[in-house]
Image: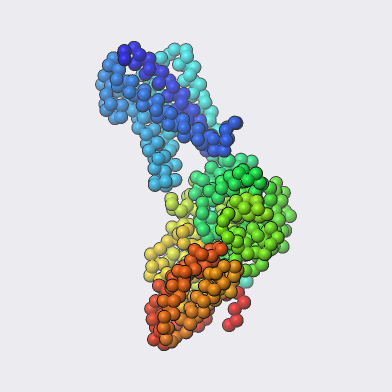
Amino acid sequence: MSSEILWYANRATGAVCLVLFTVVVLLGIAVRLRTRLPGLPRFGTVALHRGLSLSVTAFLAVHIAMAVIDGYVDITVLDAVVPFVSAYEPLWLGLGTVALDLLLAVLVTSLLRERIGHRTWRALHWLAYASWPVALIHGIGIGTDTGTDWMTWLTVSCVAAVVAASGIRLAHSARASRRTPRSPAPHRRRSPHMTTTTAFTDVYMSPRLLAPGGTAADLSTHELRYGPVAYGDPDGLLRTVAESGLTGRGGAAFPTYRKLVAVADASRRAGRVPVVVANGAEGEPASRKDKTLLRLSPHLVLDGLQLAARAVGAGEAHLAVEDGASYLESALAQRHDPLPVRIVRLPKRFLSGQASALAQYVSGNAPLPRHQRPPVRERGVRKAPTLVQNVETLAHLALIARYGADWFRSAGTPAQPGSTLCTLHVPGREVRVVEAPFGLPLNRLLPLREASAVLVGGYHGTWIPAAEASQRTLDATDLGAGVLAALPTDRCGVAETARVLRYLALQSAGQCGPCLNGLPRIAAAFQALAIPGPQANTRQDVARWAGLVEGRGACHHPDGTARLVRSALTTFAPELDAHARGLCTASDLTPLLPIPNEAH
């Protein structure tokens, strides 16, 4: 290949790199502004941004190769990657090398995004803004076409486009920062008739979800505190939710973005308009977080419900609750939402909030779980694709829509961003609902020095020894219903578990073998273990039956019960040994965990 051809190829690829790099920067700004370009499908802007980024890399590789191969000037591979070492035009060529290194850093960290965390990736991604002007100056300083009419117009056009887009981006950021809520001063409020709902600054965080002071927020107070929410861009919202890393707060911790997209996709395949159900059932007796949230911040939940409905294209929205329906209907009457919301009053049962049972009840049937295939997201309320989303998740969604993914991720950990509501049970204290960031040590939420064990996640959760709990942090994977209960050393964990298992057996739907036969048998055997005396093979039988019921139910009720059983057999093994010898180490028989309609 002649030197002249290489020279022309180098000039051409340099100009193409400038144009493509400019377009990539503009598309990056468009993605941050949640802009959907005309004619592009959902997430088309993001896909185009990524595709052109790879194209820039390819043309840049060709551009560098042409410069190294061309023997007219002495440029080595080392000169192309190490700044300011070239004998030929060290300043201008060095700036091009700096731009290349910055761009490579952006590309490599993008490939490692899942490993390094969103916050680190976002910080490094800003290098793209630095790389573009450095590359531009490199081209002006070293390019042989600098000063020609066509190159001047091309350069001016690229600069004008990036400056204009950056100005729009900065203005948008300034408006968003003015809308971000100020952290209110901490309050303490205690009442024998009210769940404590405020945060304590020495332990938790400034409240995001809950109205400060334990006072319910009406619509005007809500809008004053959080500002308005825009419903107009579902694709932009989905991108922001994906970036935020929000997961469900109903127990499964499933990524909210994936759930929203799955319902939207199922709707498109089936040709049916989807339904959205806000799940505020909270059939878990030990949990009060959803009831507290709905009482103190109902409009945050209702905002999230409208946003979710808009994101999936729903034509129907419901809010399902056991208590507080009249209050929520009053809250709805204050609003002028684009999609009407119907309040559904649920019977007070443990399984009423199970997704398929909830879909059945909204459809006009009994609130009984059905088999897990097809899932509710494909065939739910009246056989339409249905999004069932916990009310706390929807409240987080409303905040993310206002303040963005970075704000949401400023709490929690890179792997588990954000905060969550927890119901805390400590003997001698009233039950409290608090908001805490993921990653917070459990010993800052519960006093563990006088505890023997902690129940994490509720009645479908796990018992863990207090010593182990003191080394753990708040973790979405095992938090379940958001319940944390400290069992004192003077209580019997076997007796507490027996009470819960009896309740769970009575609350089963009785539609499958594990619920009809397995759970009652496990509950009766565990009740026998709770009474000091000979155990024969009862402990081994309980462990074996727990394995038999798991994974065989119409819903996950047997699985959650088996999880609790196995953890109790392990955590309370010393107490079970004492019971086998006819002894019980407990000196206080007062129940810790609430059981509805239990006779004492």
Q: Position of residue 178 (x, y in %)?
A: 57, 44
At x 44%, y 70%, the residue is: 566
At x 53%, y 44%, the residue is: 240
Q: Could you tell me if residue 321 is visible in this image?
A: yes
Q: Nearer the viewer, residue 361 or 403?
A: 361
Q: Is residue 52 above or below residue 410?
A: above
Q: Could you tell me if residue 353 is visible in this image?
A: no
In the displayed structure, does residue 81 sit left or right of residue 559? left
In the displayed structure, does residue 340 sit left or right of residue 14? right
At x 50%, y 72%, the residue is: 426
Using the rendered view, name the quadrant where residue 13 is placed: top left
- Report the quarter where the C terminus lies: bottom right
Across the whole image, how many numbered discs are drawn on residues?
0
- Report the quarter where the N terminus lies: top left
Q: Is residue 360 above or below residue 48?
A: below
Using the rendered view, name the quadrant where residue 103 is placed: top left
The colour scheme used here is: rainbow
Q: Position of residue 456 (x, y in %)?
A: 47, 66
Q: Position of residue 543 (x, y in %)?
A: 43, 73
| Extreme-right residue of the structure | 333
Q: Nearer the viewer, residue 160 or 74?
A: 74
Using the rendered view, name the quadrant where residue 63 is placed: top left
At x 50%, y 45%, the residue is: 243
Q: Position of residue 109 (x, y in %)?
A: 39, 40
Q: Is residue 334 above or below residue 126?
A: below
